[in-house]
Amino acid sequence: MAQHKVYSAIVKAIKKRKLKEPFGSKEFRIACPGFADGTYNAFLYKHRKGNPGGNSELFKKVASGKFRVIRPFKYGLWFSKTSKRKNLSLHFLIVCLKFFPMYT
């Protein structure tokens, strides 16, 4: 599964409280510097829920020019460094219960 560098930067900025939701391209540019100018103008719209291009739906448009990240985060970005092992153990348990229901 492909991982968006831009999406990762947005999620990290939200987790670090550098980017507050809902946000627009201006706030996105300030919180996540270093991308091409066109990225700030197009990425949020290109990946909004219901986009006409069939691109991955990463954001929900909540007002004119304002977006929220759709949760749960995609591409494994819900993991924090400190809780990754705990989350993986929980995921393993859920998978086991799904495929081996006779043990529940």
Image: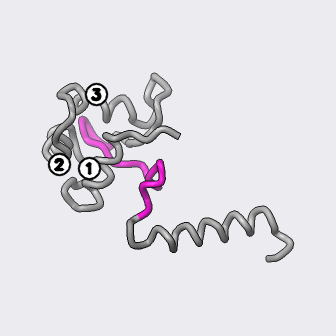
Mark 3 or mark 1: which is in front? 3
Look at the image and give the residue range highlighted in magenta. 62-79
- Residue 18 on the magenta segment: no
**Mark 3: few/some/many CA within 10 Å (<14, 14-19, 20+):** few
76 magenta-colored: yes
Residue annotated with mark 3 = 42
Tell me which label, 3 or 1, sits earlier in the chain. 1
Looking at numbered disc 3 in the image, what kind of residue is underneath it?
A: Ala
Residue 85 point in image, percent of width and height: 50, 71
Q: Quadrant of residue 88?
A: bottom right
Q: Secondary structure at mark 1?
A: loop
Q: Amino acid at mark 1?
A: Pro
Which sits earlier in the primary sequence, circle 2 or circle 1? 1
Query: What's the magenta bit mostly, secondary-structure-wise?
Result: loop
The residue depicted at 25 percent of the width and 41 percent of the height is 66
**Farthest residue toward the bottom?**
104
The tag on residue 31 is 2
Q: Residues within 10 Å of mark 2 (few under 14, many from 20)?
A: some
- Distance Cα–Cα, label 3 vs label 1: 16 Å
- Residue type at mark 2? Ala
- Residue 22 numbered mark, or none: 1
Q: Is residue 103 left or right of residue 10?
A: right
